[in-house]
Image (cartoon, grey):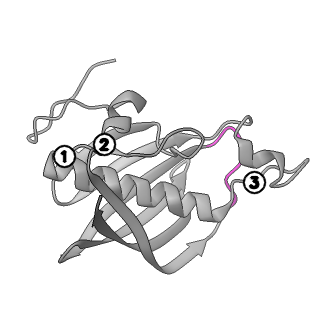
Amino acid sequence: MSSDVPASGISLPLDVVAIQKLLPHRYPFLLVDRVVEFEPHQRVLCYKNVTGNEPFFEGHFPGHPVMPGVLVIEALAQAGGILTQLTTQMTADGRLFYLVKIDSAKFSKMVVPGDRLDLEVTIVRNIRNMTLYSGIARVDGKQVACAEILCAEVKS
């Protein structure tokens, strides 16, 4: 697998080890497996491999596993956090971002084991210590969910 080095100087793709340096999330709540595209101050494309052994599938729903929509939105928010961290060349140390608002969330298809959930997030605008993101989640190129997500940085 070859690495692509964009103008930002970041070598892509980024794996889970690199992602864990950017986000405080850990298993079972880290919902991004790989970063494949990055444009500073603009957009990021990440993905999550959805596997049948995810802990939430045990109860959602037995015999008919479906990834909860709130976790699809959380995965988009984590991709947004990665975009901000890569843009500012920061690590997770001393920085926490909280999801403070979700607007226009729409779910158009279920996400099930075996899917690769592609997470495309763009920055709409920065407002003081907050960032408004627009996110689209896709499986096989088809939109499964979208939302506008507002996250605020809280100094730890």
Q: Which label lies toward us, 3 or 2?
A: 2
- For label 2, the residue is 22
Q: Amino acid at mark 2?
A: Leu
Name the residue at 26% across, 32% down.
12
Q: Are marks 3 and 2 in contact (CB under 8 Å)?
A: no
| Residue designated by label 1 | 90
Q: What whole-number distance in Å separates the C-alpha atoms at marks 3 and 2?
A: 28 Å
Check disc 1: other Cα within 10 Å, few if <14, some if 14-19, many if 20+: some
SS of the residue at dot 2?
helix
Q: Which mark is residue 66?
A: 3
- Under mark 3, the amino acid is Val
> Dot 2, how many residues are within 10 Å of its Cα: few (below 14), some (14-19), or many (20+)?
many
Q: Are marks 2 and 1 in contact (CB under 8 Å)?
A: yes
Answer left or right for 15 relative to 122. right
**Percent from the top left, x then y, of residue 145?**
55, 66
Q: Earlier in the sequence, mark 3 or mark 2?
A: 2
Instruction: Tell me where residue 98 appears, x and y as whole percent.
Output: 40, 66
Whole-angstrom CA distance, mark 2 to mark 1, is 7 Å
| Residue type at numbered disc 1 | Met
Q: In the drawing, does residue 118 fall left or right of residue 108? A: left
Image height of 69 relative to 12, above or below: below
First to last magenta residue range: 110-115
Alpha-carbon span between mark 3 and mark 1: 34 Å
Mark with earlier residue (2, 1) = 2
Residue displayed at 43% across by 60% down: 77
111 in magenta? yes
